[in-house]
Amino acid sequence: MTALPCAPVDLSAEAAALLMPLHLRVDAAGLICGAGPTFGRLVEPDPVLGRPLFDVVEIRRPGGVADLPALAAQAGQRLHLALRRDPQVPLRGLAVPLSCGGFLLNLGFGLGLVEAVRRHALTDRDFAVTDLAVELLYLVEAKTAVVAELADLNRRLREAKTAAEEQALTDTLTGVRNLRALGLVFDRLVAEGRAFGLIRVDLDYFKQVNDTLGHAAGDRVLRHVAEALRASTRGGDTVARVGGDEFVILCPDLTDAGRLMTVARRILARLSQGVDYEGQPCRISASLGLALSVDHDRATMERMLADADAALYAAKHAGRGRVALAHPDRAADAGLDVTVEGTGTAG
Amino acid sequence: MHGLINRSIQSFLRDTYGAQLWLRVAQVARLNPDGFEAMLHYDDRVTAHLVAAASQVLSRPQDTILEDLGTYLVSHPNLQALRRLLRFGGVNFRDFLHSLEDLPDRGHLALPDLDLPALTLTETGGDSFVLTCRGPLPGAGHVVVGLLRAMADDYGALVLIEHQGAEAEGGAERIAIQLTDARFSPGKRFDLAAVSG
C-alpha cells in the first residue's frame, strides 16, 4: 500500500512565523511580502515588508546572486548571506521557489549565533521550538566555565609540581641541594661534555659538636657551613649536602688544579672563622678532597667521588684542616697520587 | 562524587562563614585544608563526612545547611555562571520547573562525568507540583529546595516550596511546589548571550 500524494502545503503567515521565525517571502517582483518576527527584530527599526529583497540582504556566497533569476539558479542550494543593516551578523539559508513565482527564503545564524543574540538581544521566544540555538548558547557558556576551571586546575597543579620538585632537590636542613640534585647536575654536565672540578668537604670532629653541645648546635653548624660554602663559590657552582656532615661542590668549567685549590683555600679560610652558638664561639674544622674531571677520559660520578674521597682520606690523615688534590694516573686509571697542603687547624 | 559538588560545598562554607570556619570543618572531616579540585572525582563518603562536619562545627542541622547551599548556588555573585545555566531552562518559572527533568542531561552536556540527581516533576492540579529527587547524595532534595527558592526570586515568581521527606530511608525525596503568582515581581534580567569581557 502506498501513501496518497499530499496536497501542496498551504501555510498561513502566522503558521510560517511560528515554524520559521527567521524566514522571508519574496513575490515575483523581488519585493518582500512576508517575514518571520525574528527577522523583523534584526532590522529594527527599519521596515521589512514591501522592500526589495536585495536592499535588505546581501548574498555573499555563491557570488553574483543579486537578482531573482540568479536566486532561482541557486534554489535549494546553501546560501551565505549578510544583513545590509548589520553586516557583522552572518546568516545562512536556503531559497525554494513558490508557485506564485516568488521564493521562500529560510534563514539561520549558524556560527554567528552568539554574536547575533548579543547584538539583537534575542530571547528563547525568537527561535523555533525545534531550533537548538538555546542549547548551543548553553553549551558555549558551560564550556567556557569548564575551560576556565580546568585552566585554573592546571595552574595550581603546575605550581604544586614546581614546589614539589624544588623540595625534592633541596636539603631541608641547610637549603642547599641534596644528593639527588647533585646527580642530576653531574649527569647534565657529562651529557653536555663540560669539564668540572669536584670538592668534597668533610667536617672534622663534627660528632663531638653533636655530643657535647647537642643536635641543635650541630644543625646550627651545618647551616653555617652550607652558607659559607655558598658564599665561597660562584653562582653557577652546585653545593650539595650528601650525608650527615659531608658536602660536595661541583664547579663547572673548572679544569685547572691551581684554581680549584684556590677555591678550596678560600673555603677553609672562611670556615676557620668559626660560628657563634648561643653566644659561645664554636670552632669549625674541615678537610677537603679535590678531583678534576679532565683527569678522566670519561668521568663518572662514582669515579670522581672515589678520587675526591681518596684525597679527603689523605687530607684527614695529614692532620685535618687540610686540602688534598687527587692525581689519578690517566694511563692506567688505577694508581692515585695525592697532593696535600694546609696548616692543620685541628685542636 | 564529582569534585564540582564537593568544591561547591567548600566554596559555600568559605564564602558564607569565612576561611577560618572552612579550616575547622576540613580538620573535623580530616580533609586537606586546600579542599577539593572541581575537575577531579572523590569517594561519595567524603561528601557525607563534609556535610556532617559542617553541621557539627556550625551547630546547625544538615538539612538547613544543604538548603542554604542550594540558595547560595544561584544567588552568590561568584556563581553567576550556574544561575545563567539554569536560566537557560525557560523563560518563566513554570517553564523552568518543567526543564528540571532535563537537568541531568544538561549536566552531561557540560561535563559528561557529572551525575546530578534525577528529578521528576508531576503536576498535581492547578499550579501545584510535586518534584521527586533521587541521587547519590542523601538530602540533595534540600539543596533543590534552596535552589528553587532562589530561582523563584530570580524569575520574580511567588512560590511556596516544602520538603516532604523521603519516601523511604535513602529513597527519593519529595518536594511540594505551589505556584501562587508567576509574575509577582519583575525578577532579574537575563540575556541569552553573556556580555563578553
Image (spheres, rainbow, N blue to C red):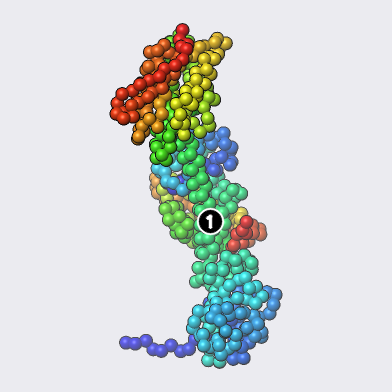
Q: How many marks?
A: 1
Name the residue beneath numbered marker 1.
Answer: A144
Where residue A284 sits in the image (x, y, percent)? 49, 14
Which residue appears at 57% of the width and 84% of the height?
Answer: A64
Residue at 62% over, 84% down: A53
Please identify the residue farthest to the top as the structure is shown: A347
Report the front residue among B156 and A145.
A145
Who is closer to the viewer here, A332 or B125?
A: A332
Is label 1 in a helix, a strand or a loop? helix
Chain identity of mark 1: A
The structure residue drawn at horizontal position 41% and vertical position 29%, both measured from the top left corner, is A292
Q: Where is residue A68 in the image (x, y as percent from the top left)?
A: 58, 88
Q: Foreground: A67 or B135? A: A67
Task: Determine whether B68 is above or below A129 in the image.
Answer: above
* Residue B74: x %, y % from top left: 57, 51
In the figure, is residue A139 to the left or right of A299? right
Which residue type does callout 1 highlight? Thr
Give the left or right position of residue A281, taking residue A31 as reference: left
Q: Which residue is drawn at 51% across and 70% down?
A: A131
| A342 w.r.t. A307: above or below | above
For residue B192, say whether it is visible.
yes
Q: Is residue B22 left or right of residue A181?
A: right
Q: Which residue lies furthest to the right in this view?
A: A45
